[in-house]
Amino acid sequence: MTIVVLFVALALGVRPHVVALGTGIRVKMADNWSIEDVAAAMASNPDLARVNTVGRPSPPKTEQGQSLINAPRTKGATRNKYGVAPKEDRIYNGVLYASKKEAKFAAELDLRKKAGDISFWLRQVPFALPGGSVYRLDFMAFTRLDDEAAWLVDYIEVKGRDLPMGKLKRHQTEEIYHISIRVV
């Protein structure tokens, strides 16, 4: 009941003083409001009196009476904070990629492999950097050179937005490992 009184008091514009004593919390009402005054205000306003069985205020409801907390989300109603596409759009061949562009590029690499342009490819290849950090290259595509036991390696980074930290790590990787990373 103490928590309910606190919420109701705040809703009515009363500033309660909350004091923690031992294991319980006591609420002392400011502006000469007693518990009886708050109970009377709750009885006169049904929105304030709506309390669930554990003593917490009930969640807000829609016009149809459905809880807003557990309401089903409609597709496309919310966006990711960083603008990332939904998971369904980022999955290719059973693998979840960081972006839709990366998933499309993986599909393109598979097509190039089927066409014989490349022999095989790897994804998320780690490169150790100074200070214990790691740069993860998006893709490495390997092509066997004709009549030789040598491979041509294509280092590929798929970028939608090239941020300064990514540029720095990419440049460090190129300098340390003496490679050239192609940004797509």
Image: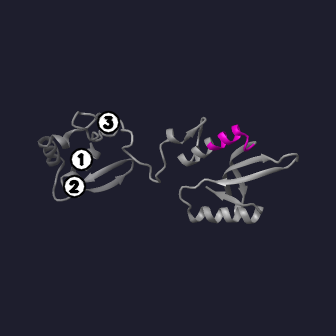
- The prevailing secondary structure element of the residues shown in magenta is helix
Q: Amino acid at mark 3?
A: Val
Separation of residues labelled 2 and 1 (CA atoms): 9 Å
Query: Residue 176: x and y, percent?
Result: 76, 64
Separation of residues labelled 1 and 3 (CA atoms): 14 Å
Q: Is residue 31 left or right of residue 6?
A: left
Residue that badge 3 annotates:
54
Q: Quadrant of the N terminus?
A: top left
Label 3 neighbour load within 10 Å: few <14, some 14-19, many 20+: few
Q: Can residue 99 be seen at all in this image of the molecule?
A: no
- Range of residues picked out in magenta: 108-118
Q: Quadrant of the C terminus?
A: bottom right
Kindly indicate whether the residue at mark 1 contacts the one at mark 2 (C-beta within 8 angstroms): yes
Q: Residue at x 38, y 46 (%)?
A: 78
Q: Amino acid at mark 1?
A: Val
Kindly indicate whether the residue at mark 3 contacts the one at mark 1 (C-beta within 8 angstroms): no
Closest to the observer, 20 or 91 = 91
Query: Secondary structure beneath disc 3?
Result: loop
Query: Residue 113: x and y, percent?
Result: 70, 40
Q: Is residue 102 left or right of residue 128?
A: left
Query: Residue 12: x and y, percent?
Result: 18, 52
**Residue 43 tag number:** none
Residue that badge 1 annotates:
5
Q: Of marks 2 and 3, which one's residue comes earlier in the chain?
A: 2
- Of the two numbered discs 2 and 1 in the rendering, the one whose residue sits closer to the viewer: 1
Q: Is residue 168 left or right of residue 64?
A: right
